[in-house]
Amino acid sequence: MSESNTAPRTPGWLSVANPASRFVLQGELPALAAAASALGFESDVGTNEARDNGQFALLWLGPDERLILAWQEGARQLAPRIANALAGHAHSLVDVTHRQVSRCVRGEGITELLNCGCPQDLDITQFAVDRCSRTLYNKAEIVLWRRGPNEFHVEIWRSYADYFERWLIEAAQDLPVSTL
């Protein structure tokens, strides 16, 4: 029997995340705080924190950088909301929607599976729910956001998505991973 070059069947613990528009916002703290407020958050996110209010998610990527995810309905409202809030503030707001994609990884054993390729300690005592980080998964840069005890949201550049998925599926063959 010959080997097939087709992609392996996608397991139940790996799925495409909800559609979102993505923006990277850079600026000083007053600009970041103004944007957070305009998106409906009481305050800006802290170091390695993520927040989600159902329309928007705000993720800390660095001291002066945030990733904004605008879920379906929020995408249409983002531009007018944020334009007014950022008026008068030095900032950069770049639409990166077409650059990257999102994956949801959830299930029993998922932390151990992600740690096969991620150098960060993802144990829940070290990387709690609603923590996020720009990190690596093997050779691919990702943004990792813990949504629940056994659930992660992964932002990855589109060109590395297949590599990421195949690597996870391969690593899962040696670990007990089950769908929740």
Image (tube, rainbow, N blue to C red):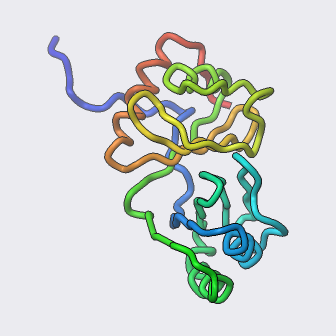
Q: Quadrant of the N terminus?
A: top left
Task: Using the rendered view, name the quadrant where residue 88 is placed.
Answer: bottom right
Q: Which residue is found at the position 76% from the left and 53% from the top?
A: 46
Task: Using the rendered view, name the quadrant where residue 179 is placed.
Answer: top right
Residue that lies at the very extreme toward the left in this rendered image: 2
Q: Determine whether 126 is above or below 96 in the image.
A: above
Q: Which residue is found at the position 47% from the left and 31% from the top?
A: 137
Q: Which residue is found at the position 38% from the left and 62% from the top?
A: 98
- From the viewer's perspective, tell me whether residue 129 is left or right of residue 103: right
x then y, percent, for residue 109: 65, 21
Q: Determine whether 86 is above or below 60 in the image.
A: below
Residue that lies at the very extreme toward the right in this rendered image: 42
x then y, percent, for residue 112: 62, 20
Q: Which residue is found at the position 71% from the left and 52% from the top?
A: 50
Quick one: 117 or 148, which is closer to the camera? 117
Quick one: 76 or 5, which is closer to the camera? 76
Is residue 53 among what the camera can see?
yes
x then y, percent, for residue 76: 56, 81
Quick one: 100 or 32, which is closer to the camera? 32
